[in-house]
Amino acid sequence: MEYRRIWHQGGTYFFTVNLLNRQNDLLVRHIQILREAIQKVKTKYPFKIHAWVVLPEHMHCVLELPLNDADYALRWRLIKSTFSKVIDKTEYRSSVRLQRNERGIWQRRYWAHLIVDDADYRAHMDYVHINPLKHGLVKRVQDWEFSSFHSLVGKGVYPIDWAGGSNDHLYSDKDWL
């Protein structure tokens, strides 16, 4: 099967990246390792984070690449491999993955969508941040800590009670990464 990707230098993209085992909490359990992997890759191969949410077994983000660069695949390969190298090898690995010397942490593919206009951007930003509520992990968006939502509240992009909730929750104005 041929997978088609849209490569646009300087593009802003929405991504969904999943663990292979969707009954896992590896990403939130090892959130600091994930943050360090992202930061390490971001330092060497820059990108701008517009939004990011990490759930137990998958994550969504909106990222913008530099003007002269369209290689998001390199960044994802490095983020996934950097994270995987630090995690203990306790996961099940199929015979194919063993033959290829691959870990059994990540799904091989991920969803990538080129943002095409302001409405598309807003819709995907909202989708990222509503996701913990959608999956029943919290009753209010503001209660999910593994999200860029809090820094965007601090920047005035979202009100603290966006999508329901009260104003009594303190937020961090620090960037998520």
Image: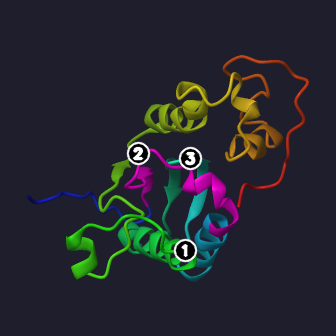
Q: Amino acid at mark 2?
A: Ile
Circle 3 residue: 56
Marked residue nearer the N-terminal end (2 or 1): 1
- Residue 53 included in the magenta stretch of the image: no
* Residue sitting nearer the eye, 30 or 117: 30
Tell me if 159 is positioned left or right of 172 in this view: left
Q: Residue, x 66% and y 72% (percent of image)?
A: 36
Kind of residue at badge 3: Pro
Q: Residues within 10 Å of mark 3 (few under 14, many from 20)?
A: many
157, above or below 88, in the image:
above
Quarter of the figure with residue 145: top right
| Label 1: how many Cα within 10 Å (few below 14, some 14–19, many 20+) | few
The quarter of the image holding the N terminus is bottom left
How many angstroms separate mark 2 from mark 1 (CA)?
36 Å
Nearest the camera: 18 or 66?
Answer: 18
Q: Is residue 114 left or right of residue 41?
A: left
For the record, the magenta segment spans: 11-33
C-alpha separation, residue under disc 3 versus residue under disc 2: 25 Å
- Say which residue label 2 marks: 115
Question: Is 19 left or right of 41, judged from the image as shown?
Answer: left
Residue linked to disc 1: 88
Percent coordinates x, y for residue 101 in the rendering: 30, 82
- Work out whether 108 lies above or below 88: above
As measured in the structure, the alpha-carbon distance from the residue carrying label 3 to the one carrying label 1 is 17 Å
